[in-house]
Amino acid sequence: MNRVIESLHGGLIVSVQAYPGEPMRSPETMAQIARAAEQGGAVGIRCQGLADISAIKDRVEIPVLGIWKEGHEGVFITPTLRHARACSMAGADIVALDATRRPRPDGRTYAQTVSALHDEGILVMADCGSIEDARQAAESETDMLSTTLAGYTGERIKTDGPDLGLLTQMVAEFPDIPIICEGRVHTPAQAGAVMKKGAWAAVVGTAITHPTTITSWFSQAIKDAE
């Protein structure tokens, strides 16, 4: 197994992202947060955009999982081969792609995109929304599968926490492929639960790196108590 993927086994991957217009939206800030996450024990960092990938890669020693979001509907997480290549050139050790069965903007199939990236020695993680997506990704010899898009593509109900049902199914069906659990892992207990279900690693983003949302959770709890 590739040493980068092996290094993620049994660990926490922290997703470090801020959206345009937010107070923390700068590559330097993202790099500082990524470094703090590394010091806290993270084994990998997931991040978005070429500037952030480059800045974070310069700051941490752990693997960087890069994506490039473009648009807001359909396939927008690293939607084309061009986007994926750019993420790799910016410093991503692994590039994550939307692995749904929806049409891709450049007209290539998911399998064609993965094949081209593998020809260039680029590791690929599949962001799946269903078991059918995972099967497509596995058939395409994707290096890692993830539950990232579960609940966001219309094929599965959006669960309050991580989609343990999909995770369990993926782990059982693809025992030889690392399965990453990503999406709505909001507490340490949930992170522990996904590892007990057989996840290769757990991805936590909002609950660690998005103070606006975290603050809103506490604020709403106080309002509800009143």
Image (cartoon, grey):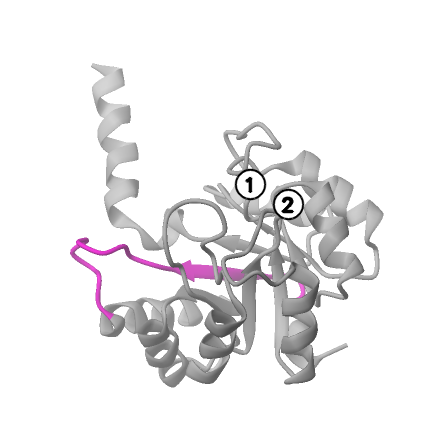
Up/down of 12 relative to 3, above or below = above
Label 2: state its secondary structure.
helix
The residue indicated by pointer 2 is: 194
Residue 9, given in percent of the width and then of the height, sits at 67, 66
Label 1: state its secondary structure.
helix
Q: Label 2 amino acid?
A: Val
- For the point 63% across and 68% down, which residue is it? 113
Task: Kindly indicate whether the residue at mark 1 contacts the one at mark 2 (C-beta within 8 angstroms).
Answer: yes
Disc 2/disc 1 C-alpha distance (Å): 6 Å
The magenta span reads: 7-26
Q: Which mark is residue 190?
A: 1
Q: Quadrant of residue 122?
A: bottom right
Q: Is residue 10 magenta?
A: yes
Residue neighbourhood size for the residue with mark 1, other residues' Cα within 10 Å, grouped as few (<14), some (14–19), many (≥20): some
Residue 187, given in percent of the width and then of the height, sits at 47, 42
Residue neighbourhood size for the residue with mark 2, other residues' Cα within 10 Å, grouped as few (<14), some (14–19), many (≥20): many
Q: Label 1 amino acid?
A: Gln
- For the point 28% across and 25% down, which residue is it? 221
Residue 35, given in percent of the width and then of the height, sits at 36, 73
Number of numbered discs: 2
- From the viewer's side, name the closer residue of 151 and 10: 151
Q: Quadrant of the N terminus?
A: bottom right
- For the point 21% across and 20% down, which residue is it? 223
Q: Quadrant of the C terminus?
A: top left
- From the viewer's side, name the closer residue of 176 and 36: 176
